[in-house]
Image (spheres, grey):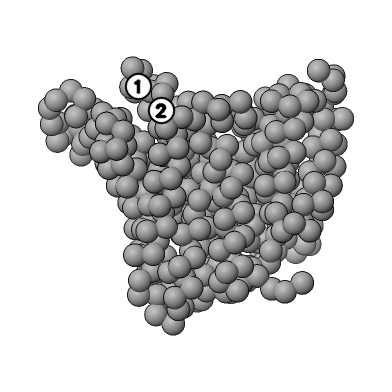
Amino acid sequence: MIKTNAELGLSLIILAGFLAAKLFRTAKIPAVTSYILVGIVIGPSGLGVVPEGILAASGFISDVVLGLIAFGIGRSFSFRTLGTTGRIVVRISAMEALGAMLLVTAALTVLLDVPLHVAVLFGAIASATAPAATVMVVKETRAKGPMTDTLLGVVALDDAWALMIFAVSMVAAKTIASGGADHLDLLMETGFAVLEIGFSLILGAVFAWLLHHYSSRVLDPSDLEVFTLGIILLTVGAASSLGLSVLLACLALGVVLVNISSKGCRFFEVIEPLDTPLYLIFFVLAGALLEIGLLKEIGLLGLAYIVFRVAGKLIGAYIGASDAGGMGSRMRKYIGLGLIPQAGVALGLALMAREQFPNVGETIFSTIVATTVVFELAGPIATRTALSLAHEIPED
């Protein structure tokens, strides 16, 4: 193993990611996929040249980048431009999440004879979608259009649906495993999930008001960039400390800011220059942390999870977009392809399942970790394909 210090390791991450993105661009492979591939090559599963200190800081980097991503997605929820798209976003996000959950649960139970309570947990985890890869592909391709706007809204809401579905499924799984029905537990778990979502949104809204209220005293763009970044980090830190959703809190921060005044877009514009290098580091580290050796251990269970999760997303999104109106048939056909990526939220839910169900939790967790490798590599390509087929990527 080659020994490197933190400075050399960070420079290697940035330069290798940059060169890989340039190299793969001619093959129309998204930069996200090239970053992840670089991470696999230079990470512990490959050359092992990424210092342990940087790997250990990946959790912090992940929270910061996911916070920035969620904040940026909030810009898509401007009430002045959202119009009827809001209703479609809610419907598609609900249907694609439920579609993945129901299809995975049914397939594992019927085809593989997996115990129902275990299949329910797999189904709940299948509902989660990773917004980071989708947002990065949209930024890289400069995609614009009704499907792009809808897709960004769908991945933003997906985290909320996943939290609620998993909370209910956790209680249902416990009830099935114990052979009884405790309606009080079901109501309590659902209530806790709703409260977590609600408090996350309130937290983001409070910090949005704070940023908006005091930004009138910050006239220099550089100062506004520092102030905005500080509030985003404050939102991330506060949500994490309180056990709330970082994604939902930062989403609310962005949504309130873009709607609170006609000048709300300036907060997003001053932060944009930070996106590319931070996204690069985030995805290279994500690749470095992927245990590529687990691919050979996916087995029939993992393969079924991959196939039926993808099918559930595609079918659910198609049904949800069935009356997209003037947005046309392209929305129905292709938006589901943009919902394939799965990473952080799913891994977090799988970790909770492992803690609550020690007998089967390890199988659930290891399967989700292994399938994440596939979804993170193939997901960005699927998203780019969807945007291309919808003719929302501008010609070079």
Mark 2, other Cα within 10 Å: few <14 / some 14–19 / many ≥20:
many
* Residue 245 percent location from the top left of the image: 47, 42
| In-image side of 265 versus 162 (left or right) | right
Question: Is 30 located above or below residue 52 in the figure?
Answer: below
Expressed as whole percent of the image width and height from the top left, the position of residue 307 reads 43, 45
Give the SS element for disc 2. Answer: helix
Q: Quadrant of residue 116?
A: top left
Asked if residue 218 can be seen in this view, the reply is no
Image position of 180 with respect to 388: above or below: above
**Residue at horizontal 59%, vertical 47%?**
378
Q: Position of residue 92 (x, y in %)?
A: 39, 62
Q: Is residue 295 visible?
A: yes
For image coordinates 50% across by 76% down, the residue present is 80
Residue type at tag 1:
Val
**Residue 360: which disc?**
1
Quarter of the image with the N terminus is top right
Calculate the distance from the C-alpha at mark 1 to the C-alpha at mark 2. 7 Å
Mark number displayed over residue 81: none
Q: Quadrant of residue 300?
A: top left
Q: Secondary structure at mark 1?
A: loop
Rendered-image quadrant of the C terminus: bottom right
Q: List the single residue furthest toward the bottom.
A: 326
Q: Is residue 229 above or below residue 262?
A: above
Residue behind mark 2: 364
Type of amino acid under label 2 = Ile
Above or below, 34 relative to 261: above
Marks 1 and 2 in Cβ contact (< 8 Å): yes
Identified at 34% across, 53% down, the residue is: 99
Q: Give me the residue at 44% from left, 50% from top.
A: 310
Q: In the image, is 33 to the left or to the right of 166?
A: right
